[in-house]
Every structure is written in structure tokens, then in C-alpha cells.
Amino acid sequence: MSQICMLYPGSKIDDLLENHSLEYLILLYRHGWEAKEAEAKTFWNVLCEAFSGKDDKGLSKGVEKFKESHPDGVLKDGVWILSR
């Protein structure tokens, strides 16, 4: 139940249990996770396209452009660390 509340902020477990059937709660759970999965896929696809240089808007031209923009950046354990 806490996962449903995590998917739908502002909802309370007691209110959900009192006002909705089990079938409706299962429906909320399934649709919520499908939406989160679609959101994650979209995020990673956009990120991969930006770093591969496929960004048509000119926002990024891949890793080389990123390195030019942030010459002080260091790649450590697969993560770019930038000084502020």
C-alpha cells in the first residue's frame, strides 16, 4: 500500500482503503508503475540521444562537447565530477 501512496503523492493509506475497492487499488498500482516505467524510458532515451550527439536542437553534441564545456570535469567510477 505504501507503494501506491508513493506513486500518488497526497494520498493516504487509510483514505484509499476506506474509499476504494481492492480491484481499484490494483488498477492504480499497475497504471502507476506503467507510468513510472514510461517516464524512466523517456528520460534514459533522451539522455542517451544527447550524449550520442543525436540531439537535433543543438543542446548537446555528445561527450566531446560536454568535455569542452566542462574542462575541469573528471570521470570517476563512471560519474562525471565537476567542481563548482
Image (cartoon, rainbow, N blue to C red):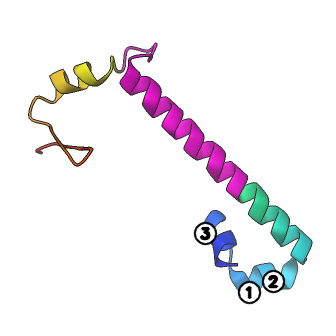
Residue located at (11% from left, 44% from top): 83
Q: Secondary structure of the magenta portion, mostly? A: helix
User: Residue 61 vs residue 30: left or right?
Assistant: left
Vertical side of 58 occupied by 14: above or below = below
Residue 54: quarter of image: top left
Quadrant in which the N terminus is drawn? bottom right
Q: How crowded is the residue under tag 2: few (<14 C-alpha within 10 Å), some, or many (20+)?
A: few
Residue located at (23% from left, 49% from top): 77
Marker disc for residue 6: 3
Q: How crowded is the residue under tag 3: few (<14 C-alpha within 10 Å), some, or many (20+)?
A: few
Residue 49: percent from the left, percent from the top? 46, 24
Vertical side of 40 occupied by 54: above or below = above
Q: Are marks 1 and 2 in contact (CB under 8 Å)?
A: yes
What residue occupies the far front of the structure in this picture?
77
**Amino acid identity at mark 1:** Asp
The kind of secondary structure element at disc 1 is helix
Vertical side of 1 occupied by 77: above or below = above
**Amino acid identity at mark 2:** Leu
Marker disc for residue 2: none
How far apart are the two marked residues, 1 and 2, measured between alpha carbons?
Answer: 5 Å
Nearest-to-viewer mark from 1 and 3: 3
Q: Are marks 3 and 2 in contact (CB under 8 Å)?
A: no
Q: Which residue is mark 2?
A: 17
Q: Is residue 55 magenta?
A: yes
User: Residue 33 vs residue 72: left or right?
Assistant: right
N-term mark: 3 or 2 = 3
Q: Nearer the viewer, residue 9 or 40?
A: 40
How far apart are the two marked residues, 3 and 2, measured between alpha carbons?
Answer: 15 Å
Q: Which residue is mark 1?
A: 14
